[in-house]
Image (tube, rainbow, N blue to C red):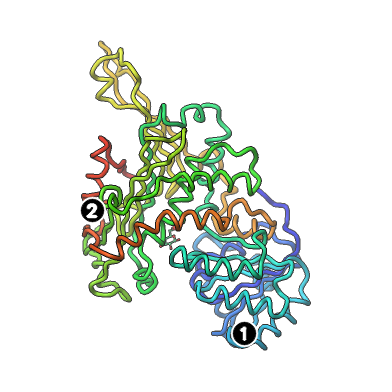
Amino acid sequence: METQPTSSFVFVLFGGTGDLSMRKILPALYEAHRAGMLAATSKILAVARHEEDRDGYLRWVTEHVKAHVAKRGIDENAWVSFIERIEFVKIDLGNAEDFALLRDVVKDLPGIRVFYLATGPSLFVPICRALASVGLNENARIVLEKPLGYDLKSSNAINDAVGEIFAEEQIYRIDHYLGKEPVQNLLALRFGNALFEPLWRREWVESIQITIAEELGVEARGIFYDNTGALRDMVQNHLLQLLSIVAMEPPHSMDSDSVRDEKLRVLHALKPIDALEIGKVAVRGQYHSGVSRGNSVPAYATEPGVKQNSTTETFVALKVEIENWRWAGVPFFLRTGKRLADRVAEIVVNFRAVPHSALGASALRAGANRLVIRLQPNETIRLYCLAKKPGEGMNLSSVHLDLAFDQFFKEGQMEAYQRLLLDVINGRLALFVRRDEQEAAWKWVEPILNEWAAAGKPKPYAAGTWGPAAASAMLAQHDTCWLEEEN
Ligand code: BG6
């Protein structure tokens, strides 16, 4: 486990009373503090307009953040010393004088300056401009949360404006999937083992599936989600990032730009989606009422904040192709959705059958090798192989080798946000999305966004199932099916 403390820093948190600060950012900072990873003199400076002063803010933190942290067990002494790190500034974003006040507070605090914008994207540019107006952009790092824009045009507008104030090396665009331990482990699996890499190509791989399935619905985020949909919320970022890590060429080192250059090459090699073909390679769905874990749950269209006749998709399945030597002709099937049958994120690599089966019909029936890399809820790798059934005759059956990471590594696991925040403080950019990656991803999804906005509507699926039948039909055309195993 990394226990070297960071350099001293001041972490300015915009949106200090928001949901993300409450659930992710402050708990992650607490964990890093408890583990002795934060330099002693470092401060967290929360910025919000809802609280009056530091005492009020600390009451809010104790009431809301402590409850989240406590779920995983809390060290009371560490909590008290964590709270001592927190300062507060009340800011009205429209008021230039408030930023002068912020500058005066920050200037007296030592260390690297990190500005974390846990706010809606419409505030990114105004906040950056206000920071620049008081000179706070110099030698600072800025962290931008997703969604960064609504489409290519709006994301370019934000990136252009932020880019006038901060250099690309100062900008940390968060995709929290990149901070997840198992996603890191994918790099270790692919580039640390001689065993897999020679097989990781079209000659040996028949198809690849990447699923991020959620059991939850849109919860309290109806207004946001209804204007966003699953393609923007999950595909443009998390799924395309996972895809690029699964498919990239080996980078020559793990430094930020080597890894990001290789991911970018994959995004550039994605076969453009032809508007006339969308019906064949993309399925959108929307959940109706159904049963989730034994409880009746409502339809998406009746969730708070959602328009009654909404055509927003809560499910997406895609067939993607990568136009390069390694992957030509191999379909990558991507899928994500809310209110599905299970919460699971996994990558399934289906290998080709042996070129000639000398072992008879049972070998053909038992199928080919398959590698299942499960990212959550539990981090495991399962390799399916064929073995002979005991007894007379040559009858084969599919068996599997299992690797459960929590049995090997009993401690040291870090939540995605903890890792990413430490990376910002330590100046490591590899796990943050570079502007060109983001642009390439928007460009690729845009024809689908446009087509879906112009015509048709999502196919219904019952909450608690695996999505519309059309998603299975798409795979059936390639003689395969989604892997849906019990957790
Ligand atoms: C977020 C999306 O980026 O990722 C949410 O906005 C989604 O809609 C979440 O629920 C999923 O993240 P995780 O880490 O819970 O799989």
- Tag nearer the camera, 1 or 2: 2
Question: On the image, which quarter does residue 116 sit in?
Answer: bottom right
**Residue 113 to residue 460: above or below:** below
- For ligand 1, give the image quadrant: bottom left
Label 2 crowd (10 A; few <14 / some 14-19 / many >=20): many
- The residues bearing labels 1 and 2 have C-alpha atoms spaced at a distance of 48 Å
Q: Position of residue 202 (x, y in %)?
A: 42, 31
Name the residue located 46 percent from the left edge and 28 percent from the top edge.
199
Q: Secondary structure at mark 1?
A: strand
The amino acid type of the residue labelled 2 equals Pro
Give the residue displayed 50% in from the left and 71% down from the top: 121
Given residues 400 and 170, the one toward you in this image is 170
Q: How many marks?
A: 2
Label 1, on which residue? 90
**Mark 1 or mark 2: which comes first in sequence?**
1
The response on whether ligand 1 sits within 8 Å of label 2 is: no
- According to the picture, the residue beneath numbered tag 2 turns out to be 468
> Toward the viewer: 428 or 268?
268
Density class for disc 1 (Cα within 10 Å; few <14, some 14-19, many ≥20) is many
| x and y percentages locating residue 263 in the rendered image | 53, 46
Query: Where residue 41 sits: x, y (%)?
Result: 76, 67
Q: Amino acid at mark 1?
A: Lys
Q: Nearer the viewer, residue 141 or 345?
A: 141
**Would residue 471 appear left or right of 424 to someone viewing this image?**
left
Q: Is residue 33 left or right of residue 313?
A: right
Task: Report if residue 210 is visible in the image.
Answer: yes
Q: Nearer the viewer, residue 418 or 118?
A: 118
Q: Under tag 2, what secondary structure?
A: loop
Q: Residue at x 58, y 46 (%)?
A: 261
